[in-house]
Structure formats: C-alpha cells, structure tokens
Image: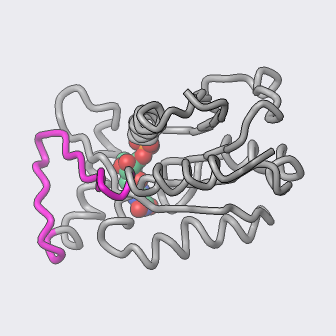
Amino acid sequence: MSNKQILIAYATRYGTTEITAKDLAKIFDELEINTDLLDLKQTKEKEWPLLDAYDGIIVASGIRIGKWMKEPQKFLKTFRNEISSNEIVLGLFINCATCLIDPATANNEYLEKVIEKLGIKPNIYRAFGPILDFSETTRIGKIARAILKKVIEKDFEDAGIQIDYKARNDLREMDQIREFAEEFAKLVKEKSY
Ligand SMILES: Cc1cc2nc3c(=O)[nH]c(=O)nc-3n(C[C@H](O)[C@H](O)[C@H](O)COP(=O)(O)O)c2cc1C
C-alpha cells in the first residue's frame, strides 16, 4: 500500500451511489491506495472526519427529480476552504438516468451548475449511469417506480436501451468508472506533499 489516503463521501436514495463508491474503493485498493467511505446521510455532521488526513476527496450524489441530495452539497459547502486548497485532489461523481440518454445535459445540469453554485473547483468530475431497480427487493417505492417508468420509458426506447420493468437493471458503465478511478488515483499519487 502507498501512504495515500482517499475519502469518498456520498449520499444515496436507492443505493446506486453507494455501490459505485464501493466499486471505486475496490479499484483504489488494487491501485494500492487506502479508501474510507462516508455515508453522509447516515453520519451526523458533527461526526464528519477532519480532512487533513486525506490526499483526495470524492463527493458523490444520486440524482432525483433533477437534484443532488442535500447532504453532499452541505459537505462541499462546509469544507469549501479545505477542498479548494491545492493540497487535496477533489473529484465529484453522480449516478443518474439522464447520464445515459443525454450525457451533455447531465454534465451541464447536474455537475457544472452545481460546481458553479457551490463555488468549488474539482480536479475531475463524471456522470455515470443509473441502477434502475424494478425487482421485488427494490428500495424504490411503488409511486416513485411508476413515475420513473413514465419519465424514462420513451427516451430509453428511442435510445435503444432495453429495460426490464420487473428486474434490477445495472446500467452503469464499469469501464468509465474504472477510468475515473485510475485518473483520480494518478492525480493523488502525483501529489508529493
Ligand atoms: C423517483 C425518481 C426520480 C428520478 N429522477 C431523475 C432525474 O430527474 N434525472 C435523472 O437523470 N435521473 C433520475 N432518476 C434516476 C436516478 O438518478 C438513478 O436511479 C440513480 O441510480 C439513483 O441514485 P441513488 O440510487 O444513489 O439514489 C430518478 C429515479 C427515481 C426513482
């Protein structure tokens, strides 16, 4: 293991962003970098760690009705000074349905507008696809599932993306997630202090 340390601070409604955070942690482990995971929804603000132990911070959110969850926005606001210093590499990612259908809009609406609003300067940011879980064990409630189906059905059909509305559909692009991890790890390893 290198002596580099990464924190992934995330918030999820239906589990996708947590699964992506854990996938990234596995890749960082292969790249010999330690990762701590921080579930921002489950951890009280006063228990958030100090950031000085970390060489890289990744902040992530699931998207629902066009919005980030409030906790990762709060985290970024709270630590704006620390993460704006050159000493920490900052990465952002989101998981969303639009990311698959219209990546440019997802990038603009869900990343660049948030970056501008919060006044932060991430070194790297990416929009990944969703997990759309219509299985019996889904965390998405019945009404939310119906809304989701209604909103995505036509766009996904037009884009030729098949969805099984009775199953769990993992539509994330694992090669892009790996590429993001490798790029982030490179930036962290290049930091010499
Ligand atoms: C009720 C509902 C609303 C959603 N709204 C959006 C949306 O506005 N834009 C979008 O790109 N994806 C939307 N999605 C898709 C989610 O972003 C996607 O399922 C993602 O994987 C959720 O991340 P999470 O599981 O970490 O919360 C929505 C999903 C649900 C269930």
* Scheme of image coloration: one colour
Q: Is residue 42 left or right of residue 120?
A: left
Question: What residue is rendered at 56% in x and 38% in y?
Answer: 11
Which residues lie in the magenta part?
157-177
Give the quadrant of residue 144.
top left
Please tell me which residue lies in front, 46 or 27: 27
Is residue 126 visible in the rendered structure shown here? yes
| Residue 2, image quadrant | top right
| Image location (x, y in percent) of residue 104 | 44, 78
Front residue of 123/151: it is 123
In the image, residue 145 lies in the stretch drawn in magenta: no
Q: What x and y, as percent, mark residue 99?
A: 38, 65
Check the picture and name the quadrant holding the N terminus. Answer: top right
Query: 118 above or below 15?
Result: below
Foreground pick, 185 / 119: 185
Q: Position of residue 133 (x, y in %)?
A: 25, 41
